[in-house]
Amino acid sequence: EAGVTQFPSHSVIEKGQTVTLRCDPISGHDNLYWYRRVMGKEIKFLLHFVKESKQDESGMPNNRFLAERTGGTYSTLKVQPAELEDSGVYFCASSQGVAGATEQFFGPGTRLTVL
Amino acid sequence: GQNIDQPTEMTATEGAIVQINCTYQTSGFNGLFWYQQHAGEAPTFLSYNVLDGLEEKGRFSSFLSRSKGYSYLLLKELQMKDSASYLCAVRDRWSGGYNKLIFGAGTRLAVHP
């Protein structure tokens, strides 16, 4: 069974540009999460989808971040315009079940560098 | 507030036993997870505790005391490949769902021959 995949693995952009990160969850997993790890800090929750609906977006830092999950399969996270403080590793995770009370499987992350 | 504390770094010898502690103060609690993460790779699930006590899985065991806000991960018969970061994460309880994970900063474990 394929795991959670993320694309790209690395992205280097300049301040003010736009970047779109993609996550493909494990097939059949209704729950999809985005997390972020800024250099030297802990992994922090950004948002949670159940199928195509945003269940919890309390961790989204500001309106420069837009997450979508059209069709309830893969998800994209767009940062527009990117700022220096957006640099970090963006992880996607997925889990089974409507209530989601199970382990979350993580992808390898996208390392974003904003110059 | 939400706070999860674990040691930043630990070292141990191959074949030995190491215990990684985690203390937490969170607004809600619906389980505690331990993940292993090798550099540049995805965090991988190790264990889950929601009730007090010890959960054993091969060389790895995890303990939880909810009243003390405390957990530990015990690694036995250490191998070189166990050198990694170990992440303690609490699943928050929120009115709209029960899934958000709150992570500690991780403990970097170095296993030496």
Image (cartoon, helix red, strand yellow):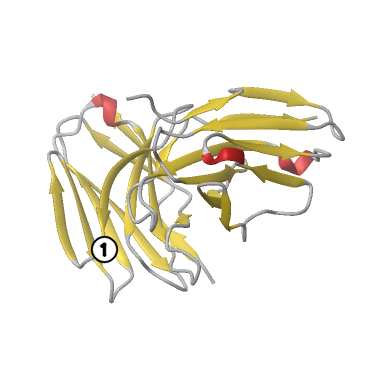
Give x and y (percent) for residue B60: 18, 43
- A89 with respect to A15 (left or right): left
Query: Do we see residue A46 in this rendering?
Result: no
Q: Secondary structure at mark 1?
A: loop
Q: Residues within 10 Å of mark 1 (few under 14, many from 20)?
A: some
Q: Residue placed at 61% from the left, 23% from the top?
A: A8
Quick one: A74 or B73, which is closer to the camera?
Answer: A74
Give x and y (percent) for residue A5: 49, 27
- Vertical arrangement, residue A107 with respect to residue A41, above or below: above
Q: Residue placed at 69% from the left, 24% from the top?
A: A11
Quick one: A17 or A100, which is closer to the camera?
Answer: A100
- B7 with respect to B113 (left or right): right
**For the residue marked with disc 1, what is the amino acid?**
Val
Query: Do we see residue B100 in this rendering?
Result: yes
- Vertical arrangement, residue A51 with respect to residue B67, above or below: above
Q: Residue placed at 34% from the left, 56% from the top?
A: A101
State which quadrant residue A74 falls in.
top right
